[in-house]
Image (tube, rainbow, N blue to C red):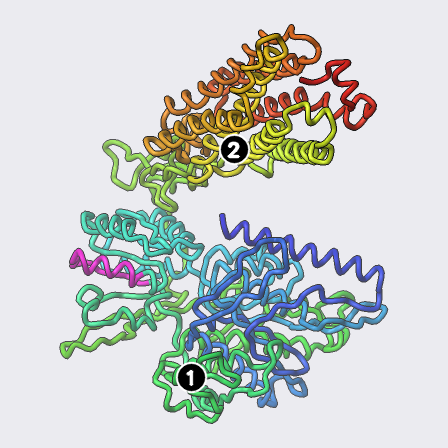
C-alpha cells in the first residue's frame, strides 16, 4: 500500500512537471526551463552517448519531514556500502573497456552518469527522473524540438520494488532500463513494463529451480519464509503455484518476516518452525532479515533443519557464515546468480582516485564518499571537531591495496557480472542500430536511427533482439518478456572440520533442464487473496476449499492456510487480503464543522476584546460608572475565557487537553456566573438602600466584598476540578464501540460524578442568579438591569438544560461538537444580552450617556 502511495505521488509529480513544461513551452517555445534540481551522489563521465546507472552505494538515508509549508531539504545518505560502489565501478569499467574496443561502437564514445539510490525509493525515483530529464537548468531547442536525450538507457535499479515504480513511469516514454538484480516475476509483464529488461533471471525460474531440487531429494513437505516486500511475496505466490502444478508437494506453513526487529513476531515464526513436522525451510529474503531470524533460532536451539536459500542471501552473506550460526546453517543449499569473471576489473579498481575539485551535481562525489569510508578520513574542509578529535584528513594519495574489505576481491563476481552484461547489452544494441543501412531500417518507410536523431524507444527495439556472448562464454539475449536466458549456480554451505566455512558450487541450473510443461495434476487451485484454505474431509492434505475470511480478518499475506484477525487499530479491506488502518474520527480543525466552531470561538473572543476596549475607553462616562465597572470588566474577561476554552474541545484528544478542557470550562463559567450573581445582588441591595432606613444593606456589598464573593465561589469550582483530576482524571480514549472499522478518538471523563458535580455547581449558581434577577424584575426603571440579567440567565439555563440529553445521545466527536456549541451559544447569549444595550447607547446614542438621561430614564442601576 505504501509503495502504491509513493508511486502515485511521484507519478503526480511527473505529470505536474510535464504540464508545467508544456505551459512553459507554449510561452517560450525555444527553451525548456528545469523547475527543480535534485542533489544526488553520483559519478559522471562525458561522451557522445550517455548511459545512466542506479546503484545502492549507501545503506541508509535521512529524509527531512515534509511539512508542505516550505521547500523540503535535500535528503542525505550515510553508511557506505562498498560492494554497491564496486558494482557502480563495474559499469564505469565496462564503458571504459567498450571505448577501447575498436570493433564495438567505432567512432562513438560512451559516457555515463551514475547515481546512488541510498536504498530509498524516493531517492531512487529522483535519480531516475534526473537521468531521464537531465540536470541542465535551461535547454535550448530548435523549431522541431528534437535532440539527443540526457541518457539513452539506464542500468538498474537493483531493487524489485524500486524497479516496479521507476519502470512504470519510464515505460511511458520507452526509456530502456536494464536491471542487474531485480528478480520479481511481476516485472516479466512486458505489456505493463514495455522498456524493462534484466540480466538476472526472474524469480519464476528460480522457483522452478527450487522445485527441481525438492523433487530431486524427495522433499514434499516444506516450510516457506519470505520477506515483506514485492520480492518475497511474489516468490511465495510463484512457489505455491509451482507446487500446485507439480502436485508433488505442499507447504507446511508460509510466514512473512517483518521488516523491523519485531521480537514477538520472530519468536512466533520460530515457534511455528519448531512445532512443524516439515524439516526443510525455503527462505526468500535478504541476509539482514535472515540474521535477525537466526538470532532467535539460536536462542531456541532449533536444529535439524535443511535450509534452502534464495539468490539474495546464498552468496556474499559472510555475516551468517560464523561458527556459531553454521551449527544450524551448515549444509544449506542455495540458488545463486551466475558467477562470472571480468579480467582487468581489479586493476581498474586500484586506479580509482578521488576528485578533489568535485561539485555536487556532476563530479565524483560518490568516489569521494567511498574514499572517506575506506580510509576513515575526511576531505578538507573537514566537519567541525573532526581534526580536533584526532580524525585524519584525506590526501587522495592513499593506497587502496591497504583497504581491508571485500572491495578488491574479484574472485566471486555475481551482481557485478550482471552489471557488466547489462552495459554490454545496451552497447551491442546501440551498435546494431548504428550499423543499420538506410532504406533497410526497421522503422517507418524503412528508415534507420542516427546518432543525431536518436530516440530511446528505438533502442528498445534493438534490445529486444540483441544477442551476444560474453568473454566468459555466456550467451546474452532477452525473451519476449525482457528476461535474460536463465542460468543459476547451485551452492552448498560447508562447515569444515577446522571450523572454517566454504560456499561450494555443486552445480548449475539452465533453462534446458525445464523444457516442456509439467503435467497438470492438482487437487485444488491456490486460494485467491482474501480467502483461506479449508481442508476437504477425507481428501489428501493438498486438497482444500477456499472460504472467504470474515470481516476483520485477512489471509496472512501470501499464507492462505488461515485467516488472522487484524490488530486492534486495523481492519480488513473489502477484498480481505490485507489489513488497513481504521479510519480515525475526532472533531478536527480541518473539517468544516471544526472550522466553523473555531471561527465562531475566535469571533466571540474578538468581540469580547472589542467590548472591553469600548468600556475601558468610555470608563468615565455615566453609563459605565453606574454599571459597576469592575464587575463588568471581570465579566468580560471571564466571557473571553469561556470562548477560548471551547478550542480545547477541537483537535485530536491528548492527555493534557482532556484534563484541561473541562477544568477550564468549569472554572471559566463559574467565574462568569459568579460575576452575574454578585451583580444581581448589588442591584437588589442598591434598591433597598434607596428606601428609608435601607442604607445599611450597602455595607455588605462594597468592592472588597464583591471581589471576595466572586473569589470564594470560583474557588469552590477549582476545588471540585482538582479533586476530580486527582481522583479520576479524564484521559484520551480510542472508542471502537460505535463502528468496527472506525476509531473514534474522545476524552473519557474518568469520573461521571465529578463531571456531574462540575455541571451541577454551574447550574446552581445560574439558577440563583436567575431567581434573584427574576424577583427583581419589577424594580423601578432605574434598576432595570435585573431584566437583562433575568433574560440572559433564561437563555443560559435553556441552553444547558438542552445540552444534557443532546450530549448523552451524541456519539463520538458529535458529543464534543454539542458541548462546544453549548459553550458558544451560552457565551454569546450572555455577551449580547448584558452588553449589547450598553454598547448601543455608548456608540449610537451618546446623548443618552449622561447622568441626567440615566437618572431620568433609568437606563442603569
Q: Residue at x 65, y 70 (%)?
A: 459
- Within 10 Å of disc 1 (Cα), the crowding (few <14, some 14-19, many 20+) is few
Local secondary structure at mark 2: helix
Which quadrant would residue 617 be assigned to in this image?
A: top right
Closest to the observer, 323 or 362: 362
| Residue beneath disc 2 | 649
126, above or below 237, in the image: below
Magenta highlight on residue 272: no
186 sits left or right of 595 in the view:
left
Q: Which residues are magenta?
A: 290-309
Closest to the observer, 433 or 725: 725
Residue 803 lies, in percent from the top left, at 52, 18
- Is residue 440 shown to the viewer in this render? no
| Total tally of numbered discs in the picture | 2
Q: Which mark is residue 388?
A: 1
Residue 619 lies, in percent from the top left, at 70, 32
Residue 389 lies, in percent from the top left, at 39, 82
Q: Residue at x 65, y 72 (%)?
A: 152
727 sits left or right of 717 in the view:
left
396, above or below 246, in the image: below
Amino acid at each position: 500500500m505504501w509503495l502504491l502511495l509513493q508511486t502515485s505521488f511521484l507519478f503526480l509529480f511527473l505529470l505536474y512537471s510535464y504540464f508545467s513544461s508544456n505551459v512553459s513551452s507554449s510561452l517560450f517555445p525555444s527553451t525548456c526551463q528545469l523547475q527543480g534540481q535534485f542533489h544526488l551522489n553520483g559519478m559522471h563521465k562525458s561522451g557522445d552517448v550517455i548511459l545512466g546507472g542506479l546503484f545502492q552505494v549507501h545503506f541508509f538515508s535521512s529524509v527531512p519531514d515534509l511539512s508542505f509549508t516550505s521547500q523540503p531539504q535535500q535528503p542525505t545518505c550515510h553508511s557506505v556500502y562498498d560492494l554497491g560502489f564496486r558494482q557502480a565501478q563495474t559499469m564505469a569499467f565496462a564503458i571504459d573497456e567498450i571505448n577501447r574496443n575498436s570493433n564495438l561502437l567505432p567512432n562513438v564514445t560512451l559516457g555515463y552518469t551514475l547515481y546512488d539510490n541510498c536504498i530509498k525509493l524516493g531517492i531512487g525515483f529522483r535519480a531516475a527522473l534526473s537521468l531521464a530529464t537531465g540536470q541542465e537548468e535551461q535547454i535550448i531547442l530548435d523549431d522541431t524540438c528534437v535532440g539527443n536525450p540526457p541518457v539513452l538507457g539506464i542500468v538498474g535499479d537493483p531493487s524489485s520494488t524500486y524497479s516496479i515504480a521507476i519502470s512504470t513511469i519510464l515505460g511511458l516514454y520507452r526509456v530502456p532500463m536494464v536491471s542487474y538484480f531485480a528478480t520479481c516475476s511481476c516485472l516479466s509483464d512486458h505489456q505493463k513494463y514495455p522498456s524493462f529488461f534484466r540480466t538476472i533471471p526472474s524469480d519464476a525460474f528460480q522457483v522452478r529451480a527450487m522445485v527441481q531440487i525438492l523433487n530431486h531429494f524427495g522433499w514434499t513437505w516444506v516450510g516457506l519464509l519470505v520477506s515483506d516486500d514485492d520480492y518475497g511475496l511474489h516468490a511465495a505466490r510463484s512457489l505455491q503455484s509451482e507446487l500446485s502444478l507439480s502436485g508433488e508437494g505442499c507447504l507446511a506453513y508460509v510466514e512473512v518476516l517483518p521488516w523491523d526487529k519485531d521480537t514477538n513476531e520472530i519468536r512466533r515464526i520460530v515457534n511455528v518452525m519448531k512445532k512443524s513436522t516439515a524439516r526443510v525451510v525455503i527462505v526468500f529474503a535478504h541476509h539482514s532479515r535472515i540474521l535477525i531470524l537466526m538470532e532467535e533460532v539460536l536462542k531456541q536451539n532449533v536444529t535439524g533443519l535443511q535450509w534452502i536459500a534464495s539468490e539474495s542471501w546464498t552468496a556474499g552473506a559472510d555475516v551468517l557464515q560464523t561458527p556459531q550460526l553454521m551449527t544450524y546453517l551448515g549444509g544449506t543449499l542455495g540458488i545463486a546468480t551466475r558467477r562470472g569473471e571480468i579480467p582487468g576489473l581489479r586493476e581498474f579498481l586500484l586506479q580509482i582516485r578521488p576528485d578533489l575539485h568535485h561539485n555536487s551535481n556532476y563530479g565524483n562525489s560518490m568516489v569521494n564518499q567511498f574514499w572517506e569510508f575506506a580510509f576513515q578520513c575526511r576531505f578538507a574542509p573537514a566537519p567541525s571537531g573532526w581534526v580536533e578529535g584526532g580524525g585524519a584528513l584525506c590526501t587522495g594519495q592513499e593506497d587502496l591495496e591497504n583497504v581491508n574489505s571485500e572491495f578488491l576481491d574479484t574472485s566471486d563476481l555475481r551482481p557485478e557480472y550482471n552489471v557488466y552484461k547489462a552495459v554490454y547489452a545496451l552497447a551491442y544494441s546501440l551498435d546494431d542500430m548504428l550499423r543499420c543501412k538506410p532504406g533497410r531500417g526497421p522503422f517507418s518507410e524503412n528508415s534507420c536511427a542516427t546518432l543525431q536523431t536518436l530516440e530511446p524507444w528505438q533502442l528498445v527495439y534493438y534490445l529486444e533482439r540483441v544477442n551476444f556472448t560474453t568473454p566468459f562464454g555466456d550467451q546474452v539475449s532477452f525473451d519476449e518478456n525482457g528476461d535474460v536466458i536463465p542460468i543459476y549456480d547451485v551452492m552448498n554451505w560447508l562447515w569444515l572440520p577446522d571450523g572454517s566455512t566454504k560456499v561450494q558450487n555443486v552445480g548449475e541450473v539452465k533453462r534446458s533442464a525445464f523444457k516442456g510443461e509439467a503435467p497438470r495434476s492438482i487437487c485444488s487451485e491456490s486460494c485467491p487473496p482474501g480467502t483461506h484454505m479449508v481442508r476437504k474431509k477425507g481428501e489428501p492434505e493438498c486438497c482444500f476449499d477456499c472460504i472467504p475470511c470474515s470481516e476483520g480478518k485477512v489471509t496472512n499475506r501470501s499464507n492462505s492456510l488461515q485467516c488472522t484477525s487484524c490488530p486492534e487499530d486495523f481492519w480488513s479491506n473489502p477484498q480481505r487480503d490485507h489489513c488497513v488502518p481504521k479510519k480515525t474520527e475526532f472533531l478536527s480543525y480541518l473539517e468544516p464543522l471544526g472550522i466553523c466552531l473555531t471561527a465562531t470561538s475566535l469571533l466571540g473572543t474578538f468581540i469580547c476584546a472589542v467590548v472591553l476596549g469600548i468600556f475601558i475607553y468610555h470608563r468615565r462616562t455615566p453609563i459605565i460608572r453606574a454599571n459597576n465597572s469592575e464587575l463588568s470588566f471581570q465579566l468580560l474577561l471571564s466571557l473571553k475565557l469561556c470562548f477560548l476554552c471551547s478550542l480545547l474541545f477541537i483537535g485530536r484528544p491528548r492527555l493534557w487537553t482532556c484534563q484541561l478542557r473541562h477544568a477550564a470550562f468549569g472554572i471559566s463559567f463559574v467565574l462568569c456566573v459568579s460575576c452575574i450573581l454578585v451583580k444581581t445582588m448589588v442591584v437588589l441591595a442598591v434598591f433597598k438602600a434607596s428606601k428609608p432606613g435601607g442604607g445599611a444593606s450597602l455595607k455588605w456589598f462594597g468592592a472588597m466584598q464583591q471581589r471576595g464573593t466572586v473569589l470564594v465561589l470560583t474557588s469552590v469550582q477549582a476545588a471540585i476540578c482538582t479533586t476530580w483530576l486527582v481522583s479520576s482524571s479524564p484521559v484520551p480514549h480510542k472508542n471502537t464501540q460505535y463502528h468496527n472499522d472506525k476509531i473514534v478518538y474522545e476524552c473519557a471523563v474518568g469520573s461521571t460524578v465529578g463531571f456531574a458535580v462540575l455541571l451541577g455547581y454551574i447550574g446552581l449558581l445560574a439558577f440563583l442568579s436567575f431567581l434573584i434577577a427574576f424577583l427583581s424584575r419589577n424594580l423601578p426603571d432605574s434598576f432595570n438591569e435585573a431584566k437583562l440579567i433575568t433574560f440572559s440567565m433564561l437563555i443560559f439555563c435553556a441552553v444547558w438544560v438542552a445540552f444534557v440529553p443532546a450530549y448523552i445521545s451524541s456519539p463520538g466527536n458529535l458529543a464534543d461538537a454539542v458541548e462546544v456549541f453549548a459553550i458558544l451559544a451560552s457565551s454569546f447569549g450572555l455577551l449580547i444580552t448584558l452588553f449589547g444595550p450598553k454598547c448601543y447607547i455608548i456608540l449610537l446614542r451618546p446623548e443618552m450617556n449622561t447622568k441626567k438621561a440615566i437618572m431620568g430614564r433609568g437606563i442603569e442601576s
